[in-house]
Image (tube, grey):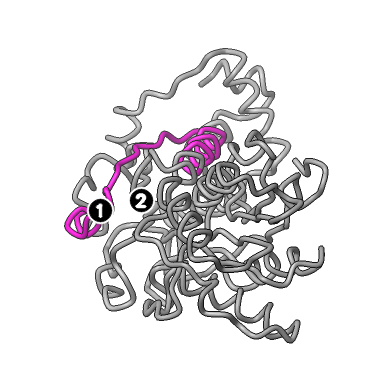
């Protein structure tokens, strides 16, 4: 630590503040210290630091499944954000199982980490009391709102509306939706919120919603996206665009459309949601909604570290939502938008 302080031209106390991720360090000073740490290969003794501070220097991330592209890329973004702040990440999969989510929410591995980022898919609004815990937690996603923890979410309704408006803007009028049914009952779920955005876009354009165009799926993966699209074709339903509620559904839809000889975007335009890396490399490349995954990770890690280092009176819970953008690619007739 003395060597880091000498190279960065700061005090040992400042190095300690950066290593422990105290928030009140000037950005340029923090960067000098981090550069010196990298240059010297300095590794804090986490065991000793934990004994002194009662902290481990590790945060948790609980997600449903790393095999799902979005959560794998979210985990990568969280790990990179934490690493820049000198913190490690322990990732656990809940597998979309209620008991596993309740264990994560209760801090079942509390002794191994200083706080947790938690992304549930089974727990819902009725389980809000499960988040009333005595350790730092930041909620991710759309399952529970108005809870006792900080929350980083996304603009599901307005971004879904923007996706459909993107399709309407290129002249499409029969927009199929993959991933939700009209009777979706979970008020806070992603499917319900994105369906609401779909409805609002159609209403604003004066287009009546056609129930036969709305196709629920049991899962949000390639297989169900392909199967739902094949049923849409086999049913003889006329459609000139598809809005898939996530990108893996969209990738399955691209496969089914290609098998049926339907050209994308000439015959049917398609847009997904989440802007996973794979969307750039499908053929054609797939338009999508970028919900700000990297910003979600940055915001969530910062909120959690603030709670971990919080002293004195606890601030009320905060909800943060990063901006989104429509990424136009070949599947809606645009050059690759990145």
Point out the tag, 2 or 1, that comes first from the N-terminus. 1
Residue at screen point 54% across, 50% down: 253
Residue at screen point 56% across, 68% down: 237
How far across and down, in percent of the image, does residue 194 sit? 54, 70
Nearer to me, 120 or 271: 271
Q: Nearer the viewer, mark 2 or mark 1?
A: 1
Q: Which mark is residue 104?
A: 1
Q: Is residue 130 left or right of residue 179?
A: left
Screen quadrant of the C terminus: top right
Q: Is residue 157 left or right of residue 231?
A: right
Which residue is outermost to the top? 40
Give the vertical position of 92 relative to 49 (above or below). Answer: below
Say which residue label 2 marks.
Answer: 116
Give the vertical position of 170 relative to 335 (above or below). Answer: below
Nearer to me, 289 or 74: 289
Tag 2 and tag 1, C-beta contact below 8 Å:
yes
**Start-end of magenta stretch:** 74-103
How far across and down, in percent of the image, does residue 76 sit? 50, 36
Q: Secondary structure at mark 1?
A: helix
């Amino acid at each position: 630590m003395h060597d880091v302080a000498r190279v960065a031209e700061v005090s040992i106390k400042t190095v300690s503040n950066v290593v422990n991720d105290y928030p009140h360090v000037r950005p340029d000073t923090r960067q000098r210290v981090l550069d010196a740490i990298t240059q010297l290969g300095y590794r804090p003794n986490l065991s000793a630091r934990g004994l002194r501070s009662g902290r481990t220097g590790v945060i948790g991330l609980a997600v449903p499944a790393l095999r799902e592209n979005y959560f794998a890329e979210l985990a990568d973004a969280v790990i990179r954000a934490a690493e820049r702040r000198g913190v490690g990440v322990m990732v656990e999969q809940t597998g979309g199982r209620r008991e596993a989510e309740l264990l994560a929410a209760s801090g079942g591995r509390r002794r191994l980490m200083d706080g947790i980022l938690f992304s549930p898919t089974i727990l819902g609004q009725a389980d809000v009391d499960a988040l009333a815990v005595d350790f730092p937690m930041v909620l991710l996603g759309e399952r529970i709102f108005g809870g006792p923890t900080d929350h980083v979410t996304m603009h599901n309704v307005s971004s879904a509306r923007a996706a459909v408006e993107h399709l309407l803007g290129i002249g499409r009028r029969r927009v199929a939706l993959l991933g939700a049914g009209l009777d979706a009952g979970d008020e806070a779920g992603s499917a319900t919120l994105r369906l609401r955005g779909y409805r609002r876009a159609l209403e604003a354009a004066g287009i009546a919603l056609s129930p036969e165009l709305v196709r629920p799926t049991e899962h949000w993966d390639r297989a169900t996206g392909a199967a739902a699209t094949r049923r849409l074709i086999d049913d003889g339903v006329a459609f000139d665009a598809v809005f898939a509620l996530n990108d893996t559904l969209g990738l399955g839809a691209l496969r089914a459309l290609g098998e049926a000889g339907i050209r994308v975007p000439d015959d049917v335009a398609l847009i997904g949601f989440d802007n996973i890396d794979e969307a750039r490399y499908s053929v054609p490349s797939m338009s999508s909604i970028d919900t700000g995954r990297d910003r979600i990770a940055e915001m969530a890690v910062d909120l959690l570290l603030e709670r971990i280092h919080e002293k004195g009176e606890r601030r009320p819970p905060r909800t943060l939502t990063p901006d989104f953008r429509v990424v136009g690619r070949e599947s809606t007739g645009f050059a690759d938008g990145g």
